[in-house]
Image: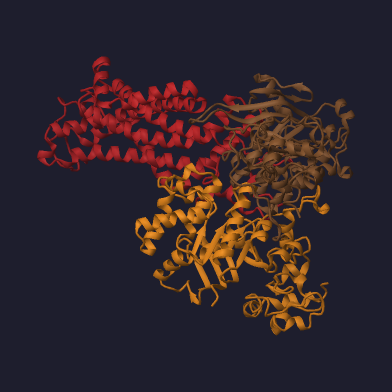
């Protein structure tokens, strides 16, 4: 609200009384010629959005966390060799507390917890993001169709959704792991299959609410077909709820990934945050008082979830013309 | 003693670090059995004014002036006293009857609640009284156990009125009570309120943007613009012979059927309501006023006597040759003596509004001379 | 009245002759809309047999209480609601309910809704809202110019100041102007407005009505304005149709219907108009708006009819309001003022079909119930 970059439209709102003098924001980045550009070109709009986004501290912090995590995860193979993660080849002290050589201490096999955590981000983020994309795509599609078209199709879709809502995620994940085999793929599918139904419910409710608003009727009266109503009117007004749902889903997906791996459904050779937690517990980190072993992956999960939440909230804030004004 | 007396009431909200006035220097009086209509467009401060009377405004709102309930200033009174007035003295009927009723409780329960709480009645007594109240607003007693959604809009508004009557109030503040209703249902509600005033000697403060509804219901009208009263007086006169151009615009918005002047000629008021955070010197209405001249934009206005029992805040009501500053120096009560034409004001009859000009004179004296110097040429 | 009437040949006051020549801008014949049963109630006969014509360049006000079917009729007129039976004719051609026919039709007939705040997508700028119609109809050429011109015709000047704004940055009146501009951007021949000023402030109301009048005078637009406000009809309309429980009960020129009403329902509506005259006794009908799932037999107004209530036993029997069906009023404006009331028929001594065709003030004076309501 207070971000200076977002106030271009706000000043115009205030300037209602002083008609005649078009707000400068309107013409500043306008096209050449006498006709003022009522809408800046796409690139400029993106730049404006980026400026407004970065001006919001929470958003910048959230994005910073995510970018950092992603960079670390992507570049990890450059500075982490096999030798540092292989239980048979490391030579550090066992369960040593943080020190100069091992900033976050070591695990039960003498590996650096810092390196493990960085490496673990690769799998955790990948599973979390892919599961979220699947969830949101499936859930939104089902929710939009069920909410918009209603009738027999909508009811049928909702019955299916209800059925999936009732599915317990853990047994499903265990069965899937049994069928597909252990590893990130089955975990991703298990997460997506069990969480899309909540998104679908949410999106459907919002779709119905938006569909009942007069501007949808106005669009129909203007000659809009179902697809146009859907993409121009319903979808933009359902987007915030989809975004919110996505940030929540990504958080819970990362947690689910950790849980499922913790339970031993992941690839036993892969390092993820969940498997680290699992190993820490099973190898007696609690008994030894090796808090660093639990703390590192736990904090990593917390930070990434926080990053997604902050980012999602900021994006929604800016996309809403009422609060953001940058579009 | 006067039931309700408002003196110099000002309300301002904090918005974006600034104080934005919503109500400025309002004086009103209302006695038992009297009906006062408060008119104005959205944003004029009329609802804020009504809420401030019972200190119903959100925290952080600044309220100044006096709201005397039977002589006692509610703005400085203890909370317990304010609460007592809220349930036993004055009730508010809000606009949206559906949202003001609790959807998961029967209407009977909701009417009974204040009776049990505040009058110490037993449930059985309260239920009997709730039945009577429903009957008196024209809803069958057997519907006591119905839920709000089972009633139509008009019936819900009646139930709201029944709830307002539950503790036998002296005053009902009705904020747009008929706005969402059909003409026929509106007529029913207005008739119900009118009967209540007649039979129970209840005072009514009714708020609406529809001058014709107010005129039908109320003895006196007060028209509000940008947080200030711009005209007060007997309702029929205000509607048929408005002295302030804004009142004229409001009155013209609802045509009299059969009046050739309004046939195929809807009258409206160009422009938008002013942003109260940015009011300049001069009359707040001047930017939209069809009759405004240079004096209006510079000289401050206040309510001046504009006929028997009437006041208007418009330079046009000042008789020829009388300067605003002269009027202020001499006091409103004396001024009409030298105002030869058209303004045979009788200050005594201008209930509660006559003495106002004098009070406001001091605070507004400063900007006046500037206006006075140029006001001579005004017709 | 014709002094300020539109230039159109088939003006509202024109006799039956020319009405045949120029097809009506919009006409409905035998229109019924029945909503399927819901929540344990029977089917709702929202519109129950309506014939109505909107001449070219005419402003017709459709008046009634909420629930009388006026909004459903308006939606049927713009093709949003498919009638159960009957037809909608645009310039004499029946509307077909296929995708392409409807889309073509919607270029010519526009709907303006009651709540301008809700009628605008909060995530669309004014430009996008106004450009929506032209874009949907593939009018990409000169889109910007089209939008600008629509905005200034709707009174938003200069249009540049509004293009990039969002609905929440506009006042209620400005929002309604944007909605109207959105309709004008397609250069429609007919505008159907459903309570266009009901949610606006009193001071803005007149401004919007002036705009509707001016659009008719300058662009020759035909407009059907749905409202519960008789004052609106007096302000802008050429003719009025009063609707009750799915039927038109009285129709005629504004002067005939509003100054010399014959139907007891119209009289009651007129009598309850608020005003400063506090001495008169309005005819306040009891009860709420009637229920379209249970339409009474005979005259559908008789349970609330003050004129019928005033009759004595034999009189009631003779009038037969509870048993005799009333004919559907004809759509032909040439037929003059008509009212669907047995009591008017009896008094005016004309055959039921031609009911108020006499249309004379005399008929009104003879109508029972004339004593009440209007001073």
> Residue, x 16% and y 29% (percent of image)?
A90
Q: Is residue B150 above or below residue B292?
A: above
Q: Position of residue C106 (x, y in %)?
A: 70, 27
In this rendering, would A70 be left or right of C196?
Answer: left
The hue used for chain C is: brown
Residue extending farthest to the top is: A179
The hue used for chain B is: orange
Q: Is residue B13 above or below residue C98?
A: below
Q: Position of residue C8 (x, y in %)?
A: 87, 35
Q: Position of residue A128 (x, y in %)?
A: 34, 30
Residue A2 visible? The answer is no
Q: Is residue A204 above or below residue B60?
A: above
Residue B282 visible? The answer is yes
The hue used for chain A is: red
Q: Position of residue B256 (x, y in %)?
A: 76, 54
Nearer to us in this view, A88 or C116:
C116
Nearer to us in this view, B34 or A225:
B34
> Residue, x 33% and y 38% (percent of image)?
A304
In this rendering, would C69 be left or right of A57?
Answer: right
In this rendering, would B344 be left or right of A23?
Answer: right
Question: Number of labelled discs?
Answer: 0
Nearer to us in this view, B137 or C216:
B137
Residue extending farthest to the front is: C314
What colour scheme was applied to this rendering of the protein? Answer: by chain
> Residue, x 31% and y 32% (percent of image)?
A254
Q: Quadrant of residue C247?
A: top right
Residue extending farthest to the left is: A287
Q: Quadrant of residue C74?
A: top right
Q: Quadrant of residue A203?
A: top left
Q: Quadrant of the C terminus of chain A?
A: top right
């Amino acid at each position: 609200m207070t971000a200076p970059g977002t106030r271009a439209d706000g000043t115009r709102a205030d300037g209602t009384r002083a008609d005649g003098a078009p707000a400068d924001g309107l013409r500043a980045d306008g096209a050449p010629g006498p006709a003022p550009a009522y809408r800046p070109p796409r690139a400029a709009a993106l730049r404006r959005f980026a400026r407004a986004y970065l001006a919001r501290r929470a958003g910048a912090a959230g994005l910073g966390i995510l970018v950092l995590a992603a960079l670390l995860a992507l570049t990890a193979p450059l500075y982490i060799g096999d030798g540092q993660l292989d239980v048979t080849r490391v030579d550090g002290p066992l369960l040593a507390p943080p020190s100069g050589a091992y900033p976050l201490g070591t695990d039960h096999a003498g590996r650096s917890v810092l390196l493990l955590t960085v490496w673990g981000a690769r799998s955790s983020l990948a599973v979390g993001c892919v599961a979220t994309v699947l969830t949101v795509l499936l859930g939104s599609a089902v929710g939009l169709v069920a909410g918009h078209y209603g009738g027999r199709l909508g009811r049928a879709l909702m019955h299916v959704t209800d059925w999936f809502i009732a599915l317990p995620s853990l047994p499903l994940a265990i069965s899937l792991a049994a069928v597909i085999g252990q590893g990130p793929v089955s975990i991703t599918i298990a997460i997506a299959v069990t969480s899309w139904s909540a998104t679908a419910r949410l999106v459907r409710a919002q779709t119905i609410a938006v569909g009942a608003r007069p501007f949808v009727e106005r669009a129909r009266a203007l000659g809009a077909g179902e697809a146009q109503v859907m993409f121009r009117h319903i979808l933009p007004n359902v987007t915030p709820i989809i975004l919110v749902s996505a940030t929540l889903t990504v958080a819970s997906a990362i947690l689910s990934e950790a849980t499922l791996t913790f339970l031993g459904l992941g690839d036993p050779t892969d390092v993820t945050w969940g498997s680290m937690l699992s190993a820490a517990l099973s190898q007696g980190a609690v008994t030894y008082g090796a808090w660093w072993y639990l703390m590192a992956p736990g904090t990593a999960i917390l930070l990434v979830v926080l990053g997604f939440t902050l980012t999602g909230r900021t994006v929604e804030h800016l996309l809403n013309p009422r609060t953001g004004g940058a579009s | 003693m006067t039931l309700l007396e408002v003196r110099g009431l000002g309300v301002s909200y904090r918005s974006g670090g600034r104080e934005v006035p919503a109500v400025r220097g309002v004086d009103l009086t209302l006695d038992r059995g009297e009906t006062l209509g408060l008119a104005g467009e959205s944003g004029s401060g009329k609802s804020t004014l009504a809420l401030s009377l019972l200190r119903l405004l959100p925290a952080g709102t600044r309220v100044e002036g006096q709201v005397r309930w039977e002589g006692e200033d509610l703005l400085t009174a203890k909370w317990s006293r304010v609460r007592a007035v809220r349930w036993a003295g004055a009730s508010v009927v809000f606009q949206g009857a559906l949202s003001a009723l609790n959807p998961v409780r029967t209407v009977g329960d909701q009417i009974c609640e204040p009776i049990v709480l505040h009058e110490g009645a037993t449930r059985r007594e309260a239920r009997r009284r709730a039945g009577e109240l429903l009957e008196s607003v024209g809803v069958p007693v057997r519907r006591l156990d119905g839920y709000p959604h089972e009633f139509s809009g008009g019936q819900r508004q009646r139930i709201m009125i029944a709830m307002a009557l539950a503790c036998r109030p002296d005053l009902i503040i009705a904020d747009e009570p008929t706005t969402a209703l059909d003409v026929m249902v509106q007529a029913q509600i207005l008739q119900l309120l009118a009967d209540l005033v007649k039979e129970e000697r209840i005072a009514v403060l009714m708020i609406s943007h529809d001058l014709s509804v107010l005129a039908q219901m109320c003895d006196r009208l007060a028209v509000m613009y940008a947080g200030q009263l711009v005209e007060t007086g007997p309702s029929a006169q205000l509607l048929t012979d408005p002295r302030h151009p804004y009142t004229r615009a409001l009155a013209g918005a609802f045509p009299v059927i059969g009046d050739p002047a309004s046939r195929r000629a809807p009258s409206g008021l160009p422009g938008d309501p002013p942003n109260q955070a940015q009011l300049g010197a001069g009359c707040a209405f001047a930017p939209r006023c069809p009759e405004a001249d240079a004096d209006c934009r510079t000289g401050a206005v206040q309510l001046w006597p504009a006929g028997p029992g009437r006041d208007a805040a418009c330079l046009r009501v000042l008789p020829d040759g009388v300067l605003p500053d002269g009027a202020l120096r001499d006091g409103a009560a004396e001024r009409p003596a030298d105002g030869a034409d058209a303004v045979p004001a009788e200050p005594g009859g201008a209930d509660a509004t006559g003495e106002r000009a004098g009070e406001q004179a001091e605070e507004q004296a400063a900007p006046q001379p500037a206006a006075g110097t140029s006001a001579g040429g005004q017709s | 009245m014709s002094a300020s009437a539109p230039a159109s040949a088939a003006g509202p006051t024109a006799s039956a002759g020319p009405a045949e020549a120029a097809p009506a801008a919009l006409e409905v014949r035998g229109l019924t809309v029945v909503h399927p049963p819901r929540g344990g109630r029977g089917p709702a006969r929202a519109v129950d047999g309506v014939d109505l014509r909107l001449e070219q360049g005419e402003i017709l006000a459709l008046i009634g209480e909420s629930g009388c079917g006026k909004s459903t009729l308006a939606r049927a007129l713009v093709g949003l609601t498919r009638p159960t039976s009957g037809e909608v004719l645009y310039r004499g051609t029946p509307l077909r309910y296929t995708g392409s026919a409807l889309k073509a039709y919607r270029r010519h007939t526009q709907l303006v809704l009651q709540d301008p705040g809700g009628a605008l997508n909060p995530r669309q700028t004014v430009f996008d809202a106004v450009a929506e119609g032209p874009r949907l109809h593939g009018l990409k050429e000169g889109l910007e110019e089209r939008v600008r011109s629509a905005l200034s015709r709707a009174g938003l000047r200069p249009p540049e100041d509004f293009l990039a704004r969002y609905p929440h940055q506009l006042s209620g009146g400005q929002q309604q102007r944007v909605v109207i501009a959105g309709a004008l951007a397609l250069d429609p021949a007919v505008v159907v407005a459903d309570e266009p000023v009901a949610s606006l402030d009193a001071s803005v109301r007149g401004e919007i009505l002036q705009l509707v009048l001016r659009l008719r005078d300058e662009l020759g637009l035909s407009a059907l304005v749905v409202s519960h406000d008789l004052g609106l009809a007096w302000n802008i309309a050429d003719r009025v149709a009063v609707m009750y429980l799915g039927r038109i009960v009285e129709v005629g020129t504004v002067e005939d219907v509003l100054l010399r009403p014959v139907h007891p329902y119209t009289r009651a509506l007129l009598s309850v108009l608020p005003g400063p005259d506090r001495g008169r006794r309005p005819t306040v009908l009891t009860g709420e708006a009637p229920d379209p799932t249970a339409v009474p037999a005979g005259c559908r107004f008789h349970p609330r009819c003050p004129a019928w209530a005033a009759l004595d036993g034999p009189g009631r029997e003779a009038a037969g309001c509870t048993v005799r069906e009333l004919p559907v009023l004809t759509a032909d404006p040439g037929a003059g003022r008509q009212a669907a009331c047995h009591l008017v028929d009896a008094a005016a001594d004309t055959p039921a079909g031609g009911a108020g065709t006499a249309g004379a003030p005399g008929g009104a004076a003879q109508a029972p119930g004339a004593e009440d309501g209007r001073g």
